[in-house]
Image (cartoon, grey):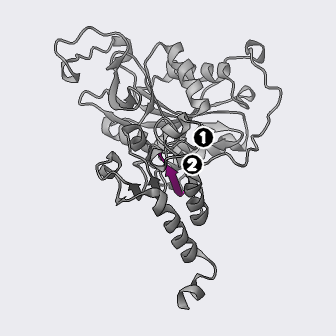
Amino acid sequence: MSNGNREAPPSAGRAGIKRELPEHFRDYRHVWVFIELERSEVHPVSFELLGEGRKLADKLGIQLAGIVLGPPGDATQHAVAEAFAYGADLVYLVEAPLLADYRNEPFTKAMTDLVNTHKPEILLLGATTLGRDLAGSVATTLLTGLTADCTELDVDVDGSLAATRPTFGGSLLCTIYTLNYRPQMATVRPRVMAMPPRTDKPVGRVIRHKLSMTEEEIITKVLGFNLDRQSAKANLAYADIVVAGGLGLGSAENLQLVKNLARAIGAEYGCSRPLVQKGWMPADRQVGQTGKTIRPKLYIAAGISGAIQHRVGVEGADLIVAINTDPNAPIFEFAHLGIVTDAIRFLPALTEAFTRRLSPHSHDKLAS
């Protein structure tokens, strides 16, 4: 599969595709990562992408650059410094008051001007609300291909970006190539890639670029900012422990068993996609490629069969414990520990055991 027009390959498969990059694209070099800065905070997915971008750049023998778009001030300079700390060789910086709040027009203008001037080979962005909006408009403006929600990035033998993502409702994985257009663009969801190590080091080469746009040219205006104070909103992506339930629990009422266990061990709770479709749990609690991608230290899946879209969203966990009555359930193929039993009976016992073990008075109880 590929983005962009090309002649039909003489034979089926990637091996039969002839790459013929137009002459004006042949001087495009380097891997770029957009450093998402919003409300003075850098989104962690930016650092995850720097780690992945480092691998791609090393394979291609080219440099890794961070792209920082923001207002003049300490927060923007901190984002520049953090880009170097997480592996960037250089940073392209656009500082302008118009970039204080995210608006599509000035950010798209800044990014496309940077691309047209400095010509990156690969451009990676986080598949966040902001990143998705920006990536789509940049790709459209530049008339290039964009592969969204990737789960794996690599380079082919000829140096092309191989971007893998789920397709057909998460039942298959496909690898997409943008053969004859530049830059090759991809978005990756938070927590899909591992966080690289941070190393304190001096700020390196910074290339500044001016934003050629005025406030009068921007249609959207920022009237104010309302902070989302929904304290009950899930933070699954960055939880250390996650407990999730699936259709094997049988009813919405039995999800309380998952919540009880999560409360006992200080975990976030979630569910598989069918439960959201049934209305048993809100969408922000869905675990999997079409929900939240997670990389916890411990993931407990109760009554979840483990379809590929679920696997893609959880296989970065350090330890996966699967509880299912079906010994042939797909989840046992990638779980580190499998327990073949009825989750409805097992979860209360597990919760009770953890409660005793983690109780402030557990030592006295065990000693008695």
Are circles 1 and 2 on residues that touch, CB within 8 Å? yes
> Which mark identifies residue 119?
none
Q: CA distance from mark 1 to mark 2?
A: 8 Å
The stretch of residues the image draws in magenta is: 239-246
Disc 2 packing (10 Å; few <14; some 14–19; many ≥20): many
Q: Main secondary structure of the magenta part?
A: strand
Question: Percent from the top left, x then y, of residue 270?
Answer: 55, 48
Secondary element under disc 1, as helix, strand or loop, is helix
257 or 113, nearer to the observer: 257
Mark earlier in primary sequence (1, 2):
2
Name above or below for residue 225 compared with residue 192. Answer: above
Q: Nearer the viewer, mark 1 or mark 2?
A: 1
Q: Which residue is mark 1?
A: 284
Disc 1 packing (10 Å; few <14; some 14–19; many ≥20): some
Residue drawn at x 78%, y 21% as measured from the top left: 221
Residue drawn at x 27%, y 30% as measured from the top left: 156
Q: How many marks?
A: 2
Q: Does residue 180 appear left or right of residue 304 in this picture? A: left
Q: Amino acid at mark 1?
A: Asp
Q: Which residue is mark 2?
A: 236
Q: Does residue 214 appear left or right of residue 143 in this picture? A: right
Q: Amino acid at mark 2?
A: Leu
